[in-house]
Amino acid sequence: MLVPKTIQVGGHVYTIRFNAVKVRDEGRRGLVNHRLQLIELGSERSESGMYTTLIHELVHIIDYVYNHNDLSEGAIDSLAEGLNQVLPQLGLELDWSEIPHV
């Protein structure tokens, strides 16, 4: 499955891009900025690590849009790891070729 350059959650369209330096400097694997509607991912991880990071940031956005930030970081981590285990078994492999590097 091709990872799109943008993704819509509710009425909000978020841009997805790799920004390894910023993400690494922040001490994280990925970042979401709701004001700029931007997901930034580190690209220095394994394929499964990047998959989990994207899912993690998407769960943050879903929580923000639909749940008003009620999920803990631990709950978001658990959901991301669980989805990372289950989704590839359904054939949902990710193609990152369209995602720009900053």
Image (spheres, helix red, strand yellow):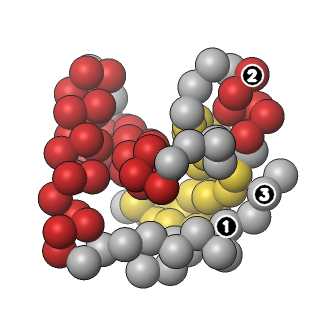
Residue type beneath disc 1: Ile
The secondary element bearing badge 2 is classed as: helix
The residue that mark 2 highlights is 25
Q: Residue at x 55, y 63 (%)?
A: 13
Element class at badge 3: loop
Label 3 with label 1: CB-CB less than 8 Å: yes
Residue marked by disc 3? 101
Query: Eyeballing the image, is 28 above or below 62?
Result: above
On screen, residue 29 versus residue 58, left or right, reads: right
Is residue 38 visible in the rendered image? The answer is yes
Q: Name the amino acid type tagged 2.
A: Asp
Q: Is residue 13 above or below residue 72?
A: below
Q: Position of residue 47 (x, y in %)?
A: 48, 55
Determine the image quadrant of residue 73: top left
Q: Pointers 1 and 2 in contact (CB under 8 A)? A: no
- Whole-angstrom CA distance, mark 2 to mark 3, is 16 Å
Quarter of the image for the N terminus: give it. Answer: bottom left
At 18% across and 45% down in the image, what residue appears? 82
Looking at the image, tell me whether mark 2 or mark 3 is earlier in sequence order: 2
Badge 1 is on which residue? Answer: 99
Q: Front-most of 72 and 52?
A: 52
